[in-house]
């Protein structure tokens, strides 16, 4: 995997990501500055730019926050091409997958501008500051939280009275669902795979039961917890169920979860962030371990527009 070391791009990581007893371990993000009202990075319009990829679920949560909070006209974005190459995430020279912000043809060119020189993986999303010409953050959870608290005075996605509940759900969902599908798909032993898949479906079962009694995860209205769950749900039946062997059940086999997912999809701005065909291109890209021929399946057909029994809202 491509990596930066002291500001220099390397196609092959000389210290590749480790697997402990065959289990996949996600590397931590390292650029974690914050947008604050009185800090170096204030929340002002037209100052920040996002580098994202449609098929990345971590970037998707940021695009969801941006859409739900109506920040599309305040924070611009460049979208990488669906499949990574030897250079990592790349951009076309023109069109919808080009970078009009810096004219970059690959994401490593953005990271190369960082001071002090960056060492680490080349991930999306990236929150770029035009004024100081540097990356504010490459940690999706932090970027979502900044959008939810610093760019939205009402703090609708992270209301003070529900923060403990939201944080508990975030922790569970990240470990067992968002990252759980990757732990299953990237497992290199049967034991590691079994452990990840069982935890994943035990958690989905728990959420299914919870949503039988409640409209959203942390109350009656959409919060950051729902926003962080949805990207995995959006990819589940078209990608994770097949490509990552998360196939005990489909999302559509869960009456409450599937109804909830369709209700979330119906929220203003959400449908424009969902692109199943690109998900398949990414997750079924050629991989020696998971898909050596790189054949992308034509199905399944998933109808996200089917009516749901619940209605979701950001507002109390």
Image (spheres, helix red, strand yellow):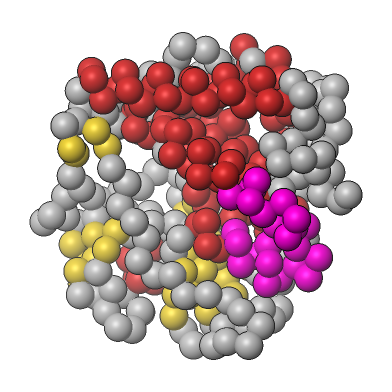
* 263 relative position to 62: left or right: right
Which residue is at the front of the view, 272 or 136? 136
At 18% from the left and 62% from the top, the residue drawn is 10
Q: Is residue 272 left or right of residue 234?
A: right
Residue 155: give x, y in percent of width and height: 75, 63
Residue 45 visible: yes
Q: Is 159 a magenta residue?
A: yes
The residue furthest left is: 14
> Compared to 34, does 172 lie above or below?
above
Query: Which of the pair 61/215 is nearer the observer?
Result: 215
Residue 310 as seen in the image, left or right of residue 233: right
At horizontal 24% and vertical 33% (from top left) the residue drawn is 23
Foreground of the two, 298 or 305: 305
Q: Is residue 304 magenta?
A: no
Residue 299 lies in what quarter of the image? top right
Please, which residue is most extreme toward the right here? 316
Residue at horizontal 39 percent and vertical 29 percent from the top: 284
**Does residue 51 show up?**
no
Q: Vertical placement of 218 versus 29: above or below? A: above
Q: How many marks?
A: 0
Q: Position of residue 251 (x, y in %)?
A: 59, 20
Nearer the observer, 221 or 285: 221
Q: Position of residue 243 (x, y in %)?
A: 39, 23
Magenta range:
144-167
- Say whether residue 107 is left or right of residue 248: left
- Residue 263 placed where, x, y %? 78, 31
Q: Residue, x 47% and y 75% (percent of image)?
A: 33
């Amino acid at each position: 995997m491509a990596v930066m070391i002291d500001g220099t791009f390397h196609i092959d990581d000389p210290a590749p990501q480790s697997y402990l007893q065959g289990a996949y371990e996600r590397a931590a993000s390292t650029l974690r500055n914050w947008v604050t009202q009185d800090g170096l990075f204030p929340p002002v319009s037209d100052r920040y730019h996002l580098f994202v990829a449609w098929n990345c679920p971590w970037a998707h949560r940021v695009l969801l926050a941006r859409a739900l909070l109506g920040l599309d006209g305040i924070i611009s974005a460049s979208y990488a091409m669906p499949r990574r190459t030897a250079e990592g995430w790349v951009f076309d020279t023109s069109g919808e997958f080009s970078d009009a912000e810096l004219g970059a043809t690959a994401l490593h060119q953005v990271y190369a501008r960082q001071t002090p020189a960056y060492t680490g993986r080349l991930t999306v999303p990236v929150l770029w500051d035009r004024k100081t010409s540097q990356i504010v953050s490459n940690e999706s959870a932090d970027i979502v939280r900044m959008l939810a608290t610093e760019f939205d005075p009402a703090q609708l996605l992270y209301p003070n009275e529900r923060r403990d509940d939201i944080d508990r759900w975030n922790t569970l969902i990240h470990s067992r669902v968002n990252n759980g599908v990757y732990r299953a798909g990237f497992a290199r032993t049967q034991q590691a795979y079994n452990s990840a898949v069982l935890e994943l479906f035990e958690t989905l079962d728990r959420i299914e039961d919870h949503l039988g009694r409640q409209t959203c995860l942390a109350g009656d209205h959409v919060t950051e917890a729902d926003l962080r769950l949805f990207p995995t749900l959006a990819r589940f039946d078209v990608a994770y169920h097949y490509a990552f062997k998360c196939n005990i059940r489909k999302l559509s086999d869960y009456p409450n979860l599937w109804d909830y997912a369709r209700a979330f999809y119906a929220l203003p701005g959400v449908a424009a962030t969902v692109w199943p065909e690109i998900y398949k291109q990414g997750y079924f890209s050629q991989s020696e371990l998971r898909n050596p021929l790189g054949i992308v399946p034509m199905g399944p057909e998933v109808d996200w527009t089917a009516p749901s029994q619940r209605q979701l809202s950001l507002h109390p």
